[in-house]
Image (spheres, rainbow, N blue to C red):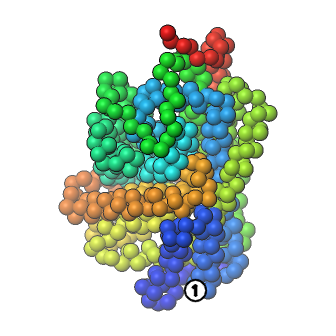
Amino acid sequence: MKWTQVIDPFNAIALSVLVAAVPILFIFWALIIRKMKGYQASLIATVMAAFIALLVYGMPVKLAVLSFAHGALYGLFPICWLVIMAVFLFNLTVKSGQFEIIKHFMASITADRRLQALLIAFSFGSFLEGTAGFGAPVAITAAMLVGLGFNPLYASGICLIANTAPVAFGSIGIPITVASQVSGIPELPISQMVGRTLPILSIILPFYLVTIVAGFKKAREVLPAVLVSGVSFAVLQWFSSNYLGPALPDVIAGLGSIICMMVFLRFWKPKTVWRFANEPAPTFQTDRSYTGGQMLRAWSPFLVLTIMVIAWGMPPIKEVLNAVGQVQFEVPGLHNAILSEEGVALPKVFKFNFLSAAGTAILIANLVVIPLIGLTYREGLKIFGATLNQLKFPVLTIAAVLGFAYIANDSGITLTLAAALANTGFLFPFFAPVLGWLGVFITGSDTSANALFSKLQFATAQSIGVDPVVTVAANVSGGVVGKMISPQSIAVAAAAGDLVGKESQLFRFTVKHSFIMLGVICLITLTQAYVFQWVIPTYELLIAQKTAPVTDLSQGYVYLLALAVLLIALASTIRFVSNRRAQKPTLVN
């Protein structure tokens, strides 16, 4: 069976766009007005998209069913696999009692909720985005803030909003790598262009976050710390993206801003410690301190997590893991069965990279840390079962959302919306980020949005005389502000923040901020295209695909051996310092 996609089924682009937008408009209505549960809204939107694909676009029933199944399968693995492992890690930390020590440590840096939000949601979340990505940063940081005593809605909401700054460089720069492969523009100029857009947002974002949490007046009280956080992050993000490439900006900027904040707060404190008006009286005891060994043990889950996800992102290790533990197959009945409007067959291949997936790295981290934090594997298994029960509805939501995304993409619904924006002519640079925003809203992934629209961005920019790197980078940058309202991201944040069934509240919390930030990026892109053209880097297109060198797996095995030695050394150190001194707090007279 062969079927060709249709971009304008009514031969009237305005009418086609109106019909294509129905499922997306429904999601907005269901979550904002109807206040529907996330999994219900996602399932209904999927049914609507399927009916439009079948009745309007003429997609065969078999292909629609297979497309939904392909998307749902991708939602389960690797996305749900990663989310489950990330939440499991946090639950282990809480159940073992180690999170109480972490809370004490954070309060020892600052008990102020405004600054805790910056350290965890903004800086630590950025670091996690750079290493793991795909939902892990929001899942972990939202759970940490809730554990510290934040209102669950604020915790999940600000973590979603804070996640905008690093998304473009997430997972060791994968979104930009994909944009490069699809558009034919080298990675570095795209990284440079994004790195000359997002730092503007990164400077503003910390103050914006604190204003959301505490109001404008209270945000001004911590302006010095806010500036240290935002400026240090933005400068490091700009430098690394422009001179080191797309792989490390989040890691460097996230760690750098944490260090700068910790140093600054040793010399400066806000006049008053701000906490939520309705939260319980603080339980932090100033006469309690913990040894270095206790602190190392408490932070060991996140330390091991960091080591594992960085290692799993290294190409030599990834190549070994894929060579040993990856099953790749063409989706039966769907592979090459759909033709683009130009007649090109669309490959549909599922990669089950069960070893190199980030979720597997977190699983190994979990197995390593269970004995380190004082739990048995039997107890860990019980906690894992409770985690699965906690996440049953988010897993259903994510699978439904990805099924919806794949039907929308394969039927041509998404391309109809993109074609309308591409017809805006001179104003296209203003609307270019909207394409990225739309792609991330539908798929939940900046990587997927870049795979969808980078070629369209390139061709449209060339046709109107604008440098294509501007619009391709705009697709990346615009996508980051769509992440906070993507149903997939909402489901992940709701699960981590104990808001399952209340996704509509979280969506209403973030949606206006998404539009505000999108507007800012649209204006920046427009000025870059026509006014500040000196910010555009010079580059040469990738003329031809380079021949892939023969892979030498020996380096990957050496890296894995080094990783094993590092983990054994770390585990031994933690066990040694823990056994030297009982895990009891020392009271200071």
**x, y percent for residue 195:** 34, 48
Instruction: Choose top left, top right, bottom left or bottom right for residue 249.
Output: top left
Identify whether 543 is placed above or below 66: above
Tell me the residue at 35%/69% (across/down).
431
Identify which residue is drawn at 32% across, 43% down. Answer: 219
> Which residue does the image show at 39% across and 37% down from the upper left?
274
> Which image quadrant for residue 87?
top right
**What percent of the width, then of the height, locates residue 247?**
45, 43
Residue at x-position 59% and y-position 73%: 45
Apparent side of residue 571 relative to residue 224 in the rendered image (left or right): right
How dense is the environment of label 1, judged by Cα within 10 Å: few (below 14), some, or many (20 and up)?
Answer: some
Residue hosting label 1 = 56
For label 1, the SS is: loop
- Of residues 428 and 325, the one nearer the viewer is 428
Judge by depth and name the residue closer to the eye, 365 or 141: 141
Task: Give coordinates of residue 119: x percent, y percent.
Answer: 43, 36
Number of marks: 1
Task: Determine whether 563 is above or below 128 in the image.
Answer: above
